[in-house]
Image (spheres, coloured by chain):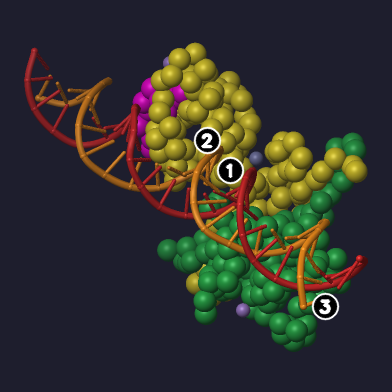
Chain colours: A green, B yellow, C orange, D red
DNA sequence: TCGCGCGATTAGACAAAGTCCAGATTGGAC
DNA sequence: GTCCAATCTGGACTTTGTCTAATCGCGCGA
């Protein structure tokens, strides 16, 4: 899959998101890298050449992408949220020292024996995070 | 197990923590409730009668408890960290709407098929979080 | 072409969680 | 009682994220 800026418009429309210049840039930052980025990192990525997207728009847009199911939130670091262009079910490996976050394919991992949910509750997602650190 | 204030001093010493009045109060807030509390909630719990512990001390003490392995951090909400007096391996159920956080016993849950760790890395912990919401 | 309407964007004020520091307090050793 | 190191404290500061009121800009109809 080639995530060019041109492809972004179609991707956005496919998720009922009106493609604007800023939204295309932000989507491109996430999808071309295929990495987990914080709002700050998205902001930096989008404004490298010259400032063209405001902080408010970055936050608004990431929230919109999240609501529309275009990206996923990953909560591993108490100080910032990461946004993940990979919305297929998968898990995460978090290197505590460096802050590096990488994917663990869900295919090979099996989770069993979870208790039944409380009544009237429905699962929104299951997050499995393997926290690792450099050997001491 | 009865988590009285008197027992707290011994518990703290057992983790190489010098028991002070503030530390005993904070430990008592966490262990007598056996609940997941945010720093703010600890602060409120400790200062109900009259103000007796500062914000700086609450944060410093929670960090100290964490380093000494007396409590565990639970990162499920992007806006605040929860502190968990239960340090035995277990998982979490997070009700997204209400913010309610509860334990899932690790005994019955089985996780298999995790890939090998990168070289020179050691597991610090595995967090499994089941995110649920009230049926729509 | 002109201008209208409305969704999108913006600057900057604001809020909340958490950190930091320099000075004050405390309590045990002597 | 004095001293000292550990601890605690108020408050300034930082960072992440939110909010708002004003502005922008694009499509459309006259
Ligand atoms: Mn541009
Ligand atoms: Mn008291
Ligand atoms: Zn991911
Ligand atoms: Zn727990």
Ligand 1's quadrant: bottom right
- The magenta-colored residue range is B16-25
For label 3, the crowd category at 10 Å Cα-Cα, with few meaning under 14, some 14 to 19 and many 20 or more, is some
Q: Is residue A127 above or below residue B60?
A: below
In the rendered view, tell whether residue D2 sits above or below residue B88.
above
**Residue pointed to by mark 2:** B39
Closer-to-camera residue (C27/A63): A63
Query: Can residue A75 be seen by looking at this rendering?
Result: yes
Write down the residue under mark 1.
B80
Q: Which label's residue is closer to the chain start, 2 or 1?
A: 2
Instruction: Give percent across and percent down for residue B27.
Output: 49, 28
Decide: few, some or many residues near mark 2? Use Cα within 10 Å; few <14, some 14-19, many ≥20.
some
How much space separates mark 3 and mark 1, taking CA atoms?
A: 36 Å
Residue A10 is marked as 3
Labels 3, 1: one chain:
no
Q: Residue at x 57, y 67 (%)?
A: A43
Whether B119 is drawn above or below B41: the answer is below
Circle count: 3
Is residue B15 among what the camera can see?
no
Magenta-colored stretch includes residue B17: yes
* Residue for point 39% across, 35% down: B56
Image quarter hosting the C terminus of chain B: top right
Badges 2 and 1: C-beta atoms under 8 Å apart? yes
Q: Does the stretch in magenta take in B34?
A: no
Task: Name the chain under label 2.
Answer: B
On what subunit does the disc labeled 3 rest?
Answer: A
Quarter of the image holding residue B18? Answer: top left
């Amino acid at each position: 899959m080639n995530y060019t800026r041109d492809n972004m418009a179609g991707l956005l429309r496919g998720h009922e998101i009106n493609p604007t210049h800023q939204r295309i840039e932000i989507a491109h930052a996430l999808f071309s890298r295929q990495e987990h980025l914080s709002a700050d990192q998205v902001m930096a990525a989008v404004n490298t050449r010259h400032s063209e997207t405001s902080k408010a728009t970055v936050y608004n847009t990431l929230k919109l992408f999240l609501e529309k199911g275009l990206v996923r939130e990953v909560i591993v670091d108490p100080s910032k949220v990461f946004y993940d262009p990979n919305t297929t079910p998968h898990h995460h490996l978090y290197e505590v020292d460096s802050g590096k976050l990488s994917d663990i394919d869900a295919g090979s991992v099996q989770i069993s024996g979870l208790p039944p949910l409380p009544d009237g509750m429905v699962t929104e997602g299951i997050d499995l995070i393997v926290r690792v650190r450099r050997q001491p």
